[in-house]
Amino acid sequence: MLRDIRTRWSSFVRGRVLTVLLALLGIQLGSLVAPAYACGCGAMVPDGTRHVTVNREMSVVRWDGRQEQIVMSLTVSGDAHKAAWIMPVPHRATVKLGDSALFDQLDEATAPEHRTRHYFWPDSGDWPFAGDDDSADAPRAGATAPSVGVVGRERLGPFDVARLTATDSDALGDWLADNGFALPDRLDQALRPYVDQGWEYVAIRLAPEKTDTPLGGTLDPLHLTFASDRLVYPMRLSRLARTPQSLGLYVLAAHRMEPTSAIGGDQPVVSYAGRVSSTSGALAPLATDGTDFLTALDQEFPQPSKIWGDHVLHRAASDATYRRVIYEDRLLRVGGVPAWLLTVGGVLSAAVVVVAIRVRARRRRPVLPPPPVQAPPPIG
């Protein structure tokens, strides 16, 4: 009987392990086959059955009330040798290569401030709760024109850039098909609202010089400029993403800016707000006297399918400044000795002194003789 139980239990365990292994294998294969069609503000389409993933997206937006500029840098990976990227824009855009040094300048300008704060009582890593360890504690994003028109086309570094107009979403599919790419049905549907609003498009082929090497690493930034009477950052196409999305956005304007809505994601978080100045480098022409207020925003989209529109940003209620602060907590010491130890030692010493004084005073106090015994009064 015991042997039968062991045999059944062994068969059950082997079956469960096999099921888990097959499930994990299916997940891995699915992640290799499924293409990544969308990134933060545009659509990325790989060639054929290949896939390309946008691992990181960094964008800088400058708006002066009439004109908007977007500088965007993508870090990609995958097995695709070629890919196309579509960026909707509300008006006709010009495109040029951006300067990657811009992001280094902004990282430095918005870096958090490091401060030290002290605590009095010992923590779990301090004596007497831990041994001697000198290691430091860790500190506590319907026209009548042809259905598709090519406004211009140019080669910019590794990019083949075409600026397009379209009166129906199939026009973009035709352009991609003529260039060796198939437009997914899901992306076709997502582009229709832009067609209905009369937007134009920047279609970019990532065409590196070495076509036998898969796309990978950080691509050269692209700098788009177009007219706009409102600050808008296209996000609608990100609803096609199959995994949670993260947006990091630097906004340069006359005042502090904030999104009008979370557009289906978590509430945007301000990581920096304040005026910046630069007389040199890539930041200088963007952070002028009229657009020198920098707002850095981070936002998470746990369920990209809930994204329902584009980010529209407006002036915040005030130009209150903000900078993140990272605190390093340290035990308060006086002359290298923990302050709590000095305090406790001082209190104990004072208590000992008080007790000693009371004992000595009690010993020196004179002993009074007992009162005399009075004789009883005589009886009658």
Image (cartoon, rainbow, N blue to C red):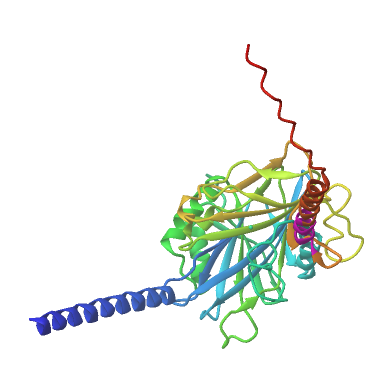
Question: Which residue appears farthest toward the front when viewing the image?
Answer: 380
The residue nearer to you, when weighing 224 against 20, is 20
Magenta-drawn stretch contains 163:
no
Q: Measured from the top left, where is residue 251 in percent x and y?
A: 73, 52
The residue nearer to you, when weighing 57 against 355, is 355
Residue placed at 92% from the left, 60% from the top?
279
Query: Which quarter of the picture shows residue 124?
Result: bottom right
Position of 106 relative to 219 (above/below) = above
The residue nearer to you, when weighing 254 against 164, is 254
Magenta-drawn stretch contains 341:
yes
* Residue 295 seen in this snapshot: no
Residue 46 lies left or right of residue 13; in this view the side is right
* Residue 215 seen in this snapshot: yes
Please provide the residue range marked out in magenta.
Answer: 338-348
Query: Which quarter of the picture shows residue 333?
Result: bottom right
Position of 37 relative to 158 (above/below) = above
Q: Measured from the top left, where is residue 164 in percent x and y?
A: 61, 59
Residue 17 lies left or right of residue 68; in this view the side is left
Quadrant of image for the C terminus: top right
Question: Which residue appears farthest toward the right when viewing the image?
Answer: 279
Q: Measured from the top left, where is residue 150 in percent x and y?
A: 62, 62
Q: Main secondary structure of the magenta part?
A: helix
Residue placed at 28% from the left, 79% from the top?
17
